[in-house]
Image: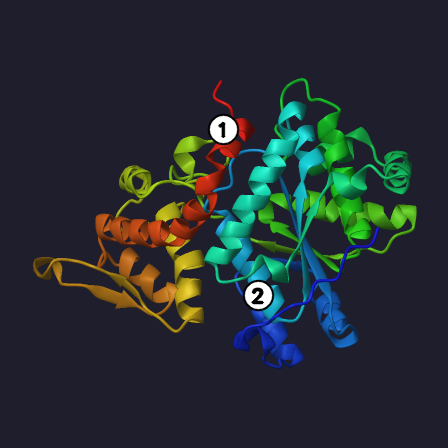
Amino acid sequence: MKFKNTEFKYSPLLSMVMDIDQKLALIRRSTAEITTEAELIALLKEKKTPSVYLGTAITGKPHIGYFVWGLKLADFLKAGFRVVVLLADLHGALDNTPWDLLEKRYQYYESVIRGMFDALGVSASKLEIVKGSSFQLSKEYIHDLLKMATFVSVHDAKKASSEVVKQSDNPKLSGLIYPLMQALDEEYLKVDIQYGGVDQRKILMFAREYLPKIGYKPRIELMTSLIPGLIGEKMSASKEDSKIDLLETGERIKEKLNKAFCPEGQADQNGVLAFAQHVIMVMKEDNKKEFTVKRPQKFGGSISFRTGKELEQAFVSKQLHPMDLKQAVAEEIASLLDPIRKKMKEKEQLAIEAYPQK
């Protein structure tokens, strides 16, 4: 299936000419794993406009953890890539989203994700946003899905989806179909790279193994680390206390940050510090700005940071108190989410219909 080409209107940063080393450095930034880097280098040498996609299943409400992959996709745009965001409605159904809510969830995701990219300063017109069911129900796709199923064992399918799809003692067949479709999406979206979080690693490696078995080339798989949630574990759309939704109010942001897990001097599993490092500081550095934490003079006065490393060192050495960090991060998040809330104000009914109260 072919998708309409998008005419990019790059900003000066996007339009500057980069050599392969510069592109590679940008793609490597904040990256946990590239399988394989040798293939990536070859791709950059051989192809003028390579392509990458990220897929997100339309399940729970998008949260601030999505900014991590939003920034990474912005890096790919700067490096001259064609960038595709797959809003995977059928994958949402395979992961327990009610079928009667799929269309509303898709509409909600599309609006909010576009708003997120606007907040990052990346016009959604520079992206291809694709609905999964727009090609995943085609005769050719279903044929390939059934063909792949003749090669995949139940054990391998279950293993591949174990960290992504909700599991139970009596798992549903849908969870076993999920990784097969995610592998096929690489071929049908005609991309060179699939990008995801490290929690997707088993599925990404599954795609590399099984696509060649039905005659398609393996793709490059790239992963970034996940931001810990506000309760010291993975930030999850299904765990309300672990996340801040992209439409959260300023008051709720402060409430959640005040209660967040942020032990003095501890960087490990600290979601507040991690968000500051991987989102706020990346944006500040790219815009040549500093992250300022306001403090009363009696506590040392305001302090500013130029890099994420500086921020972490100050926090670990206890020069920066958790409450001061929380307040500063809350202000930054509120400012980041404000344009998204304004954009979605006219679509409050859509949010209710997509996520009805039980």
In the rendered structure, which amino acid carries the disc numbered 1?
A: Ile
Sequence-earlier tag: 1 or 2: 2
Mark 1: few, some, or many residues within 10 Å (few <14, many ≥20)?
A: few
Helix, strand or loop at disc 2?
Answer: helix
Disc 2 packing (10 Å; few <14; some 14–19; many ≥20): some
Q: Which mark is residue 352?
A: 1
45 left or right of 358 in image: right
Q: Could you tell me residue 12's position as x and y percent?
A: 54, 77
Q: What distance separates the C-alpha of mark 1 from that of mark 2?
A: 34 Å
Horizontally, residue 355 falls left or right of residue 127, namely left
Give the residue pinned by disc 2: 75
SS type, badge 1: helix
Q: Position of residue 325 (x, y in %)?
A: 27, 53
* Identity of the residue drawn at 69% across and 29% down: 94
Residue 171 vs 69, above or below: the answer is above
Where 272 sits versus 97, above or below?
below
Asked if marks 1 and 2 touch (Cβ < 8 Å), the reply is no
Q: Is residue 58 visible?
A: no
Q: What label does residue 298 carry, if any?
A: none
Q: Which residue does the image show at 79% across and 40% down from the upper left?
A: 136
Amino acid under label 2?
Asp
Q: Is residue 145 visible?
A: yes
